[in-house]
Amino acid sequence: IELSEEMSEELDRKMHLVKKGQIATIIYFHRDEYVKITGMVARIDPTSRLLQIVNTKISFEDILDVSVREL
């Protein structure tokens, strides 16, 4: 799925809300399909553009949507 400019801006806004220790649900592209994962954010690295949910590392470029909630 190619994100429109509006969708891309909304995703960027949501990504800025993600903090380590939160529970997040991420929809991302992995091996020719979209996968939904929910878990605790173990790491977010803007420099290497990686988000880690428990033991799963996800490239920012593969993320379609993100939602977070506090513990």
Image (spheres, rainbow, N blue to C red):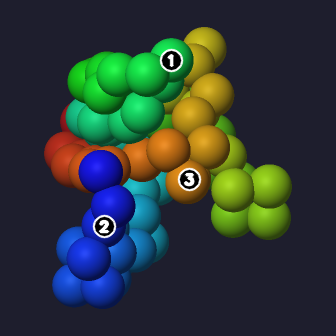
Q: Earlier in the sequence, mark 2 or mark 3?
A: 2
Give the number of the disc on residue 31.
Answer: 1
Q: Is residue 3 visible?
A: yes
Give the number of the disc on residue 43.
Answer: none
Which amino acid type is marked by label 2?
Leu
Q: Is residue 15 above or below residue 4?
A: above
Number of on-image labels: 3
Which amino acid type is marked by label 3?
Phe
Circle 2/circle 1 CB separation < 8 Å: no
- Asked whether, in this view, residue 9 is left or right of residue 51, the answer is left
Q: Earlier in the sequence, mark 2 or mark 1?
A: 2
Can you identify the residue that label 2 sits on? 3
Look at the numbered disc 2 and give the secondary structure of its residue.
loop
Can you identify the residue that label 3 sits on? 60
User: Looking at the picture, how far across and down is residue 25, in whole percent?
Assistant: 26, 34
Gap in Å between the C-alphas at discs 2 and 3? 13 Å
Q: Is residue 66 above or below residue 13?
A: above
Gap in Å between the C-alphas at discs 1 and 3? 15 Å
Q: Residue at x 41, y 57 (%)?
A: 18
